[in-house]
Image (cartoon, rainbow, N blue to C red):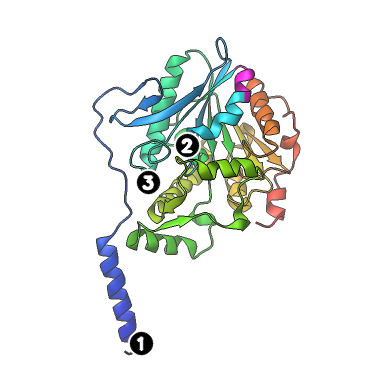
Amino acid sequence: MRPRLVLWAVTLLAATAIAGCAPTRQTIGAHSAAPRLTDGHFITGDGVRLPYRAWLPRGKPKAVVLAVHGMNEHSRAFAMPAANWRTAGIATYAYDQRGFGGAPQRGIWPGREVMVEDLKVMARLVRARHPGTPIYLLGVSMGGAVVIAAIGGAEPLPAAGAILVAPAVWGRKTMPVLYPPVLWLAAHTVPWIKVTGDDISRVPSDNTEMLRDLSRDPRVIKATRVDAIFGVVGLMDSALAAAANIRVPILLLYGEKDRIIPRKPTLAVLKRLPAARRRVALYREGWHMLLRDLQRAVVHRDVAAWITDRSAPLPSGADRRDIKLLAREKD
């Protein structure tokens, strides 16, 4: 077959595949009831039951953290820090986002708009439970992107502040040039294909016992659909764009040994965040899973200290490290 005919054949096959496939999104129902919290579930306006956990101190909390988990995880991810924050008088709430943990339509991407709206609704419900108590949003990795999109969007979610833990902001503008088109093609031709994170060069934490526990946790997704990856990249694009519009105090935490979210996009989002509102903490021995790494207690104390007094230096001194280190070091 001549080269031109081969090209036409490949093009025809690709066009046929694209015509028959598209990224799968969750089915979202019509809003038919008022959202509410029950014992253990956040019931959305369209009737979806999202499991949630709460770690409450004795007596009235001095602050509340509403935590949003990362890709393929669920609310249990915050058990370690929440236990420490509870002793400091800080309450923590966390819910399983749609498609993750014990939520329905597991593994199917829900869409950025729905994820942001769920966070806004959950924040209103938590605020109603704790009137007059400052609410802080905390997002880890993908959850960080959801938080940024919620507080930097057209109708920003009000909060006393936000803690971004290794936020997922690796959008298309900061990716190698071939990544976006290849991902688009895969998501529109073979969206059901699943990929794993079995790359020994991308270890997310130095806490091997915790990582083994995650591998045994049936609620942690071990293989991700390509169209879900396509979806999270779109979410990261939105977060990167929204960062400049944030008007609440920000504490951004990043581990200098992070091999999941590269330094370049992290530095890009830092440059977009209003300098007067941000505090940046770089942990020399920190990995991607800062709240569960071996040095996690240091990070837990810093978060509690910042919530207690945002003007005081962090106990660890991690906020005194120069963010230009991110530009000088290779990914």
In the rendered image of this protein, does residue 119 appear above or below residue 207? Answer: above
Q: Amino acid at mark 1?
A: Pro
Within-10-Å neighbours for mark 2: few <14, some 14–19, many 20+: many
Distance from disc 2 to disc 1, alpha carbons, whole Å, reads 50 Å
The residue positioned 32% from the left and 77% from the top of the image is 10
| Residue underneath mark 2 | 74
Magenta region, mostly helix, strand or loop? helix
Q: Which residues are magenta?
A: 84-89
Residue 281: quadrant of the picture: top right
Q: Dot 1, crowdedness within 10 Å: few (<14), some or many (≥20)?
A: few
| Residue 87 image-quadrant placement | top right
Asked which secondary structure carries label 1, the reply is: helix
- Disc on the earlier residue, 1 or 3: 1
Q: Residue at x 59, y 38 (%)?
A: 165
Of circles 3 and 2, which is in front? 2
> Is 87 included in the stretch rendered in magenta?
yes
Q: Amino acid at mark 3?
A: Trp
Judging by the rendered image, the residue that carries numbered circle 3 is 109
Q: Secondary structure at mark 3?
A: loop
Q: Earlier in the sequence, mark 3 or mark 2?
A: 2
Screen quadrant of the C terminus:
bottom right
